Amino acid sequence: MADFDQLKQKYQPVVDAINNNGGQVMNINLDGEQLYLKAEMDSEVGKDKVWDAIKAVDPTFADLKHDIEVKAGGQMYVVQAGIVFRRSPSTFTVMRRSTSGSPRRMTSTIPI
């Protein structure tokens, strides 16, 4: 039988990565033989750092169930003059105005 305190101690570096990268632990408990960890992060970058911490602790993470989500609107972008955002229900497309004034595609779409 899994021991909650041992699993919590094993995955403490993951909890630290959440706290140090703009996240918040929403729930941590024992789910059968696995530690269940739910967290919200401010950005995809922070989520990636948490994912790196999980793999550093145990590459198979067989004794961990995790739900790490990025908060909606958590990532901030600085918009410069001449940049146009076009939003669909699931993506943003970033455009830059050409010298003629018509928008041209600058980057791929960004999922939201």
Image (cartoon, grey):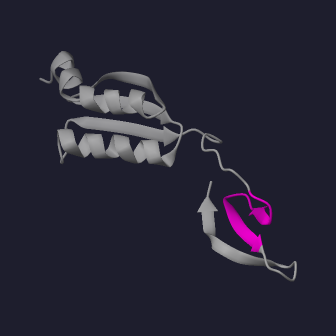
Residue bounds of the magenta highlight: 80-96
Query: Could you tell me which residue is drawn at 69 percent across and 50 percent down?
Result: 78
The answer to whether 46 is drawn above or below residue 94 in the figure is above
Q: Is residue 86 magenta?
A: yes
Query: Could you tell me which residue is drawn at 21 percent across and 19 percent down?
Result: 4
Query: Could you tell me which residue is drawn at 43 percent across and 39 percent down?
Result: 68
Q: Is residue 73 left or right of residue 66?
A: right
The answer to whether 8 is drawn above or below residue 72 in the figure is above
> Looking at the image, can residue 61 be seen?
no
> Looking at the image, can residue 14 be seen?
yes
Q: Is residue 38 left or right of residue 100?
A: left
User: Picture coordinates of residue 39 (x, y %)?
Assistant: 44, 31
Overall secondary structure of the magenta stretch?
strand
User: Picture coordinates of residue 59 (x, y %)?
Assistant: 18, 47
Outermost bottom residue: 100
Count of numbered labels shown in the rendering: 0
The quadrant holding residue 110 is: bottom right
Q: Is residue 95 left or right of residue 40?
A: right
Instruction: Give the camera-side residue of 104 and 56.
Output: 104
The quadrant holding residue 63 is: top left
Quarter of the image where the C terminus is located: bottom right
Q: Is residue 60 left or right of residue 90?
A: left
User: Picture coordinates of residue 50 (x, y %)?
Assistant: 35, 40
Q: Is residue 56 magenta?
A: no
User: Picture coordinates of residue 70 (x, y %)?
Assistant: 53, 41
